[in-house]
């Protein structure tokens, strides 16, 4: 008998948290003004101002993470400007050129390193190199970082602070792709949302709930509220105004309520840590980075990867080290069951002992 | 005691049909591949091929009507080309320039007339005028019409056929903004979806469910499947890929099932006709166009409009005839209650008799 | 023996004024810094400030009139905004959508009338109509007019003043496409360049020399110098920085020197008036508008138009009145010879008498 | 007494070759149809077909090298696609994002190496890496190389052939930025233009004359003529149609006539070699790459660079090795005088001996 397929490649295979589903159902019974002129959206704004301890911020509820990043970035990236990001950043590799499109051809300048994260040092070098020939007027308008970073680890408060200081010094903006911001926050459990964002210099945050319990809900938070003005116009032009906006706002409201967002992220992180600890002790799996959030990156032989697929376990094929070795990623969601993880581990353990002779 | 506000300006104030809500809830419990690689989306494709009696069509599930129009149009509107549409078309007046943005600056050439609808005659004149100076190579690549039209009436099968013949003759495409296609179909109750679209020459249809029972669900149907190729790429670049696509597909699947879409539209149309018949008999309300679907357009004195607002009834302020006279629109939804309509009518009747001396 | 072809459809068939040719030759012998960092460009700036009696203006030398218009307009037309122009404006009909492209999808809202010119009244109506539904925030950012207007007549100082007052009132910009600004100035011979532009509220002027003696030379003059900032960046991105900029500046410098620009325009205007007076007395030619500059618009029977072509005289086929009647345009250049005009007139006269029986 | 400033940083400081100037003067006396419908442009097409030994090619005369590159590239780079180029390529570093703009947000993927040139090996690795996660449909549509390369050396026929074979294999296009193609050809003196371009797989060539004797003249040659179709439309939209196109064509015609282009390039190359040989023997100047064309790249101490400027010799400050060491570039033009070079060499020699104690 064949094993049931277990999808472990990304957290967007997950379902919807019951609390959020309830909020959607409730919203489906009322009649409300469209385009964000509803009470849910108004309340969401209040909640976010409270959670992030800041009154002069602006928000835009969105349904797509790619659009949330691209719209946020286009608020400070003019057509003739450039921003810096990691070569492996989602905005650079996985969004089909959306930031370039939203900004009418703005340029993403890539920084390449093996750490999966930008450093203030890398950024400074790049800025100096670019401005060297362009002394009068720099065309660099910002930096974008991802929290959790591309390799699943957190940027520490100190690392971000160094980057944001450099941004201020160069008079440019700092954007954070917070697709897994909640997981980063849950990992650093003494840190407030404010301390993890605007208090350390983040100008705007694309905060994602879709990977962490929502059906389709993202929100751009402009801590620097003047950045919001253009985005408010551009959202219509890019087709991202959802008439029944209240359904996004209802999801996000429920997500923030009673710290559900942190609770869900905590669950995913803890199970990921459990899984990471176990799998990294197996012979054929080399843990590549510490598991801070809900992603586990492993180096495996190609042969092993193929065996995993045969077991009906589907991780994400992240990249190719060489023809014989791959990097794969397992992602644990809020609703991943412990039983499921244990099932995977036991299948892999079996594979592990069988494979010894194979590879 | 103050009356409760009744929102009647648009059908996007409505809630979600219970059958669709159930489908969403069901989808929220499964784990599925993201980005449309789920079984809901596969099934939706099958259903649409069956409902529209055509195998070689392609579909893209969307969450925004504006994006659905803009993406469909950009599949045949190159940056240096133009399409023809009515001056009052939603794509021209109400979408913030989205078609221009998606097509990187393609041009919408407006046709102005008082009927709210394009005619083959208008289109032919405009094409001739533009091509007169540009004989070698026309830059016109398509025509876009809206069903229900901008004034709430239907384009008849014959009218569309005349337009599509002209398109074929000029080797250009015909797009239909079908935000209220279901209402048009319900009005012409012997007509099949196929007979209302590709059989009379429509190349692609932006079909909307959001205004007719869904939470947020639209679908682009490319009857001319070669048009789909570019759109499939552009959807990522414009940020319109929703990771958990299954939630759009689930809505649409439920919408088509057991002809729910037509049933909901039928309900809205019937109640709109009832309302239209009653209100048009009152002195202060001049019905501007026959009520084919769920929209009622009325000419009223400014004073009357202001009185309506005071009664906590909110129609859409459509346009200004002059400083003393406005055009307003009432829209009836699938879930508008008869009691509500009667309440409005009785308030207006009262107003009507009171106002006689006022105006 | 066949007559020699006489090209009379546009002033871009003309050659280069000797004074300008000399300036180019002179510039070809020096070595200078590229990209506008040369002494010619610096001097040009001084001359323009003197000619237009204004110190705080910025200039950009260009080689293409279309680009000069599009770049000027994109300095105040954001992607999500719109500007108003005449339906027959060159920017709307003849520039392949360049303003839309430069502004990443900004919208040109057309005003249609039979006069070939915008009026303050038309503009006010359009603004009111658009803003009626969009009270909080108008997306209209400017108006563009053409001097000489589309029909070859001038906008009077008073007409422009009414329009610019309306612009100020609505807090939007006024652009002038001055492809034939010199001809307009020459017609109003007591008027200074300043009085014809910024003193009556023009914010930026796309001033063309190519149609009036230059090889390829246009200049954008930003009277509102803050508009220049973005344009200076955008010029590179749109590929309009010419490395050897000094060759454009040299042309323009020579064009302004000793009032050559007005002298050349005067010559063209006078010869055009002579031609217009004569031809309008012939039976088959109906003068459509007064001849203020160097363009003569005539209504002729199709048959006559075809006969003209057979005589090897080539006017511009402007538009179609109906299947039997066309509008044609003759354009007189600074270097059109009187002998040539008389030759045309005598050929037409002959045609005129012959044709009587034909048509 | 102060030395006269000698500009040596780029070949765009140069003047115009007398043969080309004569052609411009001749063209200035005739009346011709605008927009490329003139006899010069027709003849140019014939000449290019002859020089490149290919009948089915298309050409577009341009005035800007940046636009010539961007327009050529946009003919095969769709908005949602990407092309590969060297990190230091002119299209990537020095054109303000023009290719991104012309292609509405197409992406330039950079390959970084120290050789200043792409290799088939680098390209293959990058393609594999990108396609690894995107198996079904590659979004890579082309490769762009620069001849002379970014470091002033040539791509050999064999190197290009390897790259073009890889392009064919992957079904993507090969573009060549030929700003100094003539210099490359002059260096390989047995090679025909055809053997240096389409015969070794180049699909389109942006060929520049501005750096080699012209006033402002570039030409895009589409060896793959189907690529020309879109570009012909896009040229108007981007504002790059020059009304009096004959003046570009006249320059290019004279440039090709009697092999003037190769003769001018030969002169520049020879003088550059002379200069390179001499300067590289001086102590403070380290030649970085062999001098194949007209560019000499040198590594110098910062102090030396500053001394050079004080001598009123202006090379291009190319890049920064570290805080004490710079890379500078000298460029020799067709009209650089031997006396001038010797003057520079003698000033530098003097500096060289004086500086020994300084640094």
Image: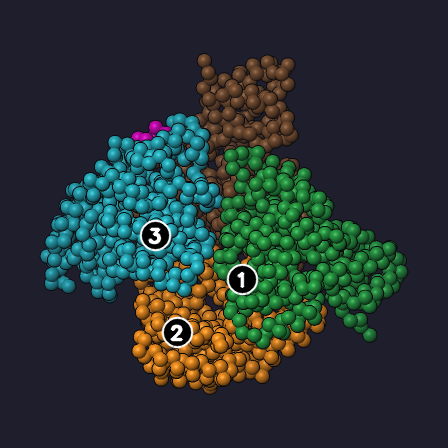
Chain colours: A brown, B cyan, C orange, D green
- Please report the residue visible at 34 percent of the width from the left and 78 percent of the height from the top: C355
Q: Which residue is mark 1?
A: D240
- Do the residues at pointers 3 and 1 share their chain? no
- Secondary structure at badge 3 equals helix
Residue C79 screen position, x and y as percent: 45, 56
Q: Which residues are magenta?
A: B21-28
Q: Are marks 3 and 1 in contact (CB under 8 Å)?
A: no
The chain holding disc 2 is C
- Please report the residue visible at 46 percent of the width from the left and 70 percent of the height from the top: C177
- Please report the residue visible at 77 percent of the width from the left and 56 percent of the height from the top: D296
For label 2, count other residues whose C-alpha is less than 10 Å away and answer few (under 14), some (14-19) or many (20+): some
Q: Is residue A161 visible?
A: no
Quadrant of the snapshot with the N terminus of chain A: top left
Q: Which residue is mark 2?
A: C307
Q: Is residue B179 visible?
A: yes
Q: Secondary structure of the magenta portion, mostly?
A: helix
């Amino acid at each position: 008998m064949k094993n049931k397929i277990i999808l472990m490649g990304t957290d967007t295979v997950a379902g919807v948290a019951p609390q959020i589903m309830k909020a959607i159902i409730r919203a489906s019974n009322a009649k409300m003004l469209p385009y964000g002129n509803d009470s849910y959206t108004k309340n969401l704004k209040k909640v976010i101002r409270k959670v992030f301890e800041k009154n002069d911020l602006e928000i835009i509820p969105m349904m797509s993470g790619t659009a949330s990043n691209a719209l946020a970035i286009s608020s400070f990236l003019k057509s003739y400007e450039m921003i810096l990001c990691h070569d492996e950043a989602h905005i650079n590799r996985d969004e089909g050129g959306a930031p370039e499109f939203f900004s009418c051809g703005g340029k993403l300048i890539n920084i390449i390193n093996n750490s999966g994260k930008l450093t203030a040092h890398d950024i400074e070098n790049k800025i100096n190199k670019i401005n060297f020939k362009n002394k009068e007027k720099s065309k660099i308008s910002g930096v974008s970082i991802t929290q959790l970073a591309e390799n699943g680890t957190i940027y520490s408060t100190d690392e971000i602070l160094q980057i944001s200081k450099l941004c201020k010094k160069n008079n440019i903006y700092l954007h954070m792709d917070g697709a897994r911001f909640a997981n980063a926050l849950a990992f650093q459990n003494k840190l407030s949302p404010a301390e993890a964002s605007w208090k350390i210099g983040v100008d705007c945050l694309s905060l994602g709930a879709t990977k962490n319990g929502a059906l389709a809900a993202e929100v751009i938070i402009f801590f620097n509220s003047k950045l919001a003005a253009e985005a408010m116009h551009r959202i219509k032009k890019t087709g991202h105004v959802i008439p029944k906006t209240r359904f996004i706002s209802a999801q996000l409201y429920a997500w923030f309520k009673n710290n559900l967002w942190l609770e869900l992220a905590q669950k995913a992180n803890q199970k990921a840590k459990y899984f990471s600890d176990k799998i990294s002790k197996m012979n054929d799996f080399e843990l590549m980075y510490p598991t801070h959030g809900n992603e586990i990156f492993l180096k495996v032989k190609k042969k092993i990867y193929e065996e995993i697929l045969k077991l009906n376990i589907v991780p994400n094929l992240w990249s190719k080290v060489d023809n014989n070795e791959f990097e794969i990623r397992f992602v644990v969601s809020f609703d991943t069951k412990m039983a499921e993880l244990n099932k995977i581990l036991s299948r892999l353990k079996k594979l592990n002992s069988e494979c010894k002779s194979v590879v």
